[in-house]
Every structure is written in C-alpha cells, then in structure tokens.
Amino acid sequence: MEFTVDGRLIEIADDGASLMEVLRDRLGIHTVKDGCSPQGQCGCCTVWVDGKPRVSCVTPARRAAGREITTLAGLPPEIRAGWGEAFCASGASQCGFCTPGIIMRLAGLEARAGRTHTRSEVASALAAHLCRCTGWQTILEAWDGFGTPAPGRDWAAAARRAALEGGVSQAVGPDVALGQGGFAADTAPAGALVALSDGRGGWALGETAAEARAAAGKVQGRRTPDERPMPLELPDGDWAVRLRTCWVEPAYLETDASWCVPGGEPAGPLANGGAFGAKLTSLLPGIARRLADEHGRPVRVLWSREDTVRRGPKRPPVAIGADADGCGVARVVRTPGVSDVIASAAPGLEVEEVDVAGPATSIALRGAGWVEAAVALDALSDGTGEMVAPGGGSAWAGWHRGSLQIHVQCGDPLDEIVLRSYCIGAAHMAYSWVTSEALAVDHSGEVHDLTIRSFGVVPASQMPPVEVEIMPSEGAPTNGSDAVFAAVAAATWRAAGQPPDWPTGPIDA
C-alpha cells in the first residue's frame, strides 16, 4: 500500500502494522514518541492524517492508505521553529518527550481555525494528551505566545536551573520541545534488536518493537473497576491530625529504555529528565549490556507502560497520627532510608515500618516521606508558614478565588522561565496527588491499574490557574520545586478540609 509521509510517497507491505510502527521503526521518524506502549492514551505519537490530528499508535497503517501523513518533522520549518520557540519561551517543555505530539495538536488547531479558540477550548483539545512535567499552564501560554519573538536567554544558566530542579543534567532550548532530547529509544543504532519483558522474568527479542511484542505475548493493560484499598491502617489514637496515602504511580511519559552494542557502555535511561527520581536505579542498562554481549548485536531494551507500573518504584504509602504538639506515629511501607527522611521533617513522630505486599518503593521519588510528614505537621499550624525542602529551598502556597498562589525562594533563580515552569509542574503534581491520584493494588501486591489514564492524573481542563512569585534571594541556587510540591500539597489538603485519606476528591477553593 502507498501513502505520503511529509511529502514523500511511501510504499510498504500491508502486514497489520500500526501507523506509529511504520513511522518510527521503518521510516525512523523519532519525533513520533511511544509513551503508552501502545494504549492510545498519552498523545505522544500524534500526527496529522489528511490535516487532522490522529493518535498513530492505535491507527492501523492500512487506514492511512492513499492519504497524506504529516509528522512534526514535516511541518514547514518556520512553523516548526515557531512552536519550538513558543514552548521554550513559556517553559512549556522540560524533558520534551510529550511535547512533539502536543505541538501537532496545537498546530492542527492553528491550521484549521487560526487564533479563534479560547484557552479553555485549547485545554479541552489536550484531553488526548498527558504531560507530567509542566502542569499544563505553560503549554496553554505557549499557545497564546505562538508567533511572538522569544526573549534572549542564557542557555547555560537555564540548563543549570533545570538540572537543579530535575536532579539530573538537562538541556534547555527550542529543539528539546521538538523532541530532540536524545532519548534512548530514539538513539539506538539502526538494526538493533528490540528486547521486551516477556512477563516471566525473561526477555523476548525481535527485529522491531512489534515483533518483540508478539514474541513476548504482550497483553494490553487495562483499568480496573476494583476499589483501591488503602495499604495501611491508621495508628490507633485520638489524634489531632490523621493522614493516610495510597499507592500512586509516578507516570513519567518516557518509559525506561536503554541500548548497548557488544562490549560497549549502555545508554542511560535518564536522557533529558529525572523521571522524578523513579529511574535512578533502573535495571535496563545492565540488561542491555548483557543481551548485546549474548547476541553479538546492538540491543535496544524497552519497558512497556505495563512494566513501568508493575516494576517501577513508587513513593511509600504512609498512615500518620499526630497530636497537637507534633508527636505521634508515622506508619510507612518498609523502604530503605524512609525512617530517616521522615524524622528529618517530623522528629516527634515515631516511625513504624510495615511490610506490605505491593510494588517496589523508593525514597528517591520527589519528596517521598518527608513531604507527607511535613504536610501532617503543617495541618497543626495556621497555614501561613513556609515549607523548607532538605536542599534549602522554601515555598509557601495558598488558594485565592480558585487560583493557587505560590511564593518560592531558592537562591539565584538563574533562569526564571525554567524555575517557574518547574514550580508550576510541581504544583500540578501535588494538586493531582492530593485530589485524584490512586493506583489499585490488591492484597497480594498485584497492580491492576495498568493504563496511563487509570492513574488519576489531572488533565489540562481541570487544572486550576497557578501564580508563581519568585522571591529575591542572594544565596547560591538550590532546588525550589520540591518545596513548592510540599507547600501545594499542604495548601490543597487544607482547602479540602483535611480528610484523613488521599485522594480527597475535587476541592472548592
């Protein structure tokens, strides 16, 4: 069958492949990203089919026969560059994995109806997408600012601020928003074997991702209708404050990936983002090295979306009871180092680590342990104090007429656009965590929510406005968004009336 891709006539076999498989695996167009493996739920693979946005991972290639396909790489250079600059100017791209698909959605709106869409209509149009980094607001600001000349920037300072906030070295610039963040799944050598988990402790290999999925016998993940039971019981006592959290999924868009050539060093899974700490101990580089040596060929190793949910680390659930003097009990799923981080934020809490069947846990995830303890103690105050993160950054958050107001102080801002972007992203993550995120894990420890839409991440249309004020400071630059994460979690829980169990459900602030 034939179709046109970015102005070029393509002829391929009609063998049941998806449009994404054709674009990525056969044509090497890596601006088309795979974030859900494939579930049709993240929007990272969005392209145009005859000028209309389409999620390509669940579009059979045969449905594109005789039609015109446009990817981000095929947009006119001035349009593509304009969107890259607009996203960079507003801070609408951090890791840059989801933004190519989002740009294709926004560029489609622009091409069909110009600037006639309201911001709420644009937010609704983003319902097919998930962004975990930016908190949506900066993406809507990029829509508003498209075509406006971008301000001059010190890119080295911007990258330094991004590294402080993200915890790993990161690039900042228009090319990042256009999907050129150097992701492992995109940079493997041509002809590399693809390895996917077979679900039985081994690895299934194929010449393409589709072939490896077939060899693995991959079964598509699902969203369960089951209840989401709390993993821990609250400590007995007549406490002034009670707080209990459930399992939640970090939900980073770029699933774990690595590749290696025989005898070489494997590519790291932290291409242009830290996955909020969840990839710091990823096993995939070691697996890529072993498989490449065994097969005598380059091997690209991928986790599916279901793999990241089942096997990726989670923040340890807690159940806290505290008296008015800040003393009490913090019960937490057993996790190396968690007692120390809780004690650092709430020395009056006696920590009880409990063995619970469930996913692996880690304190490497953003604020794990100390944020929950700090939020519990903040509930004993009048809410006017600041949250201070272990790294030294501080923040205050409050609600005013449905808008989140944030003050953050973290030394030299270096680049206010990047700092503001990370603070808005942290605000979205905290608001979403407190009000709507949950993961179904049964009493045997098996995770049942395996689709990206089942995690409860707040979409663009439901995220309240965020106003960030960067407070002057002459100190050395330090992370600020972790303190914002804690401050917004505390303010949102206070606005919800401080019910003991998270998620609380929507709030009226």
Image (cartoon, rainbow, N blue to C red):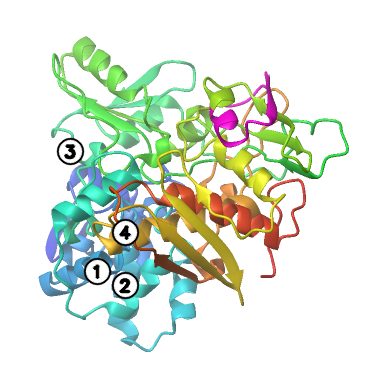
Mark 4 or mark 3, earlier in chain: 4
Crowd around label 3: few <14 · some 14–19 · many ≥20 (10 Å):
some
Query: How far apart in space, not on screen, are marks 1 and 4 (Cα)?
Result: 14 Å
Q: Residue at x 59, y 50 (%)?
A: 433
Which residue occupies the foreground of this view, 217 or 179? 179
Amino acid type of disc 4?
Thr
The residue singled out by tag 4 in the image is 99
Name the quadrant containing residue 281. top left
Q: Quadrant of the C terminus?
A: bottom right
The residue singled out by tag 2 in the image is 142
Q: Is residue 48 visible?
A: yes
Q: Residue furthest top?
A: 294
Mark 2 or mark 1, earlier in chain: 1
* Marking on residue 187: 3
Q: Which residues are magenta?
A: 341-360
Are dots 2 and 1 in contact, CB under 8 Å?
yes
Q: Position of residue 150 (x, y in %)?
A: 18, 74
Residue 422 falls inside the magenta stretch:
no
Query: How far apart in space, not on screen, are marks 2 and 3 (Cα)?
Result: 28 Å
Q: Answer left or right for 357 relative to 239.
A: left
Are dots 4 and 3 in contact, CB under 8 Å?
no
Q: Residue at x 54, y 40 (%)?
A: 249
